[in-house]
Image (cartoon, rainbow, N blue to C red):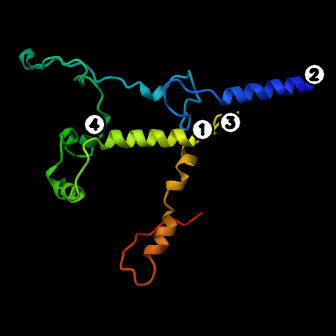
Amino acid sequence: MIKSQVLIAVALVALGACSKRGDGETNLRDLRLNRGAPEEFAIVPPKPLETPPSYAELPQPTPGQANRTDATPLKDAVAALGGNPASLDASGVPASDTALLSSAARFGTQANIRGVLAEEDLAFRKRKSIFNWKLVKDDEYNKAYRGQALDPYLWLRQVRKPGSNVRTPSAPPQQ
């Protein structure tokens, strides 16, 4: 009797490990451990309604675009600190970054680099999640990318070697 129960439990665990998610994603970054609970901070109250000085000055409604009463916490913070909130609306490359952009693009650029990287990353995560199953849900994202992470203290020691003329900032102690 006990052997048959153990055999059934092992078979169920093996069958569950073979399951595939239906959305085409891997199970490396499953953060949905707290399902069904409301997110208190996702609800942002709108700005109060105001009567405009002239109804002729109102812009045409644009479905799917921002509303005049939508909350803009970043712009409000920039304005409260004395900055220009309109600078957050800037589209394109600011004039101050043209030198950086031309230096970064000196060997050419690939127009669809984001799509290519997304496909390559999805293929990498699928390869890493083939034998990645557990009875208890865990976030395996950092384990999958551990081999690609840089050791900051190793590089700090490298650039602080005698004869290196690289100025380095102070760093927190290694734990």
Q: Secondary structure at mark 3?
A: loop
CB under 8 Å between discs 3 and 4:
no
Identify which residue is drawn at 46% across, 80% down. 161
Q: Which residue is mark 3?
A: 134
CB under 8 Å between discs 3 and 1:
no
Residue 163 placement, left or right of 2? left
Q: How many marks?
A: 4
Q: Which residue is mark 1?
A: 130
Q: CA distance from mark 2 to mark 3?
A: 26 Å
Identify which residue is drawn at 39% across, 39% down. 118
- Where residue 18 sits in the image (x, y, percent)? 65, 29
Q: Which residue is mark 2?
A: 1
Identify which residue is drawn at 59% across, 38% down. 130
Upstream in the sequence, badge 2 or badge 3? 2
Q: Say which quarter of the image contains residue 60.
A: top left
Q: CA distance from mark 3 to mark 1?
A: 12 Å
Residue type marked 1: Ile
Q: Nearer the viewer, residue 39 or 152?
A: 152
Of the residues tagged 4 and 1, which is closer to the observer?
1
Looking at the rendering, in which quadrant would you find the C terminus? bottom right
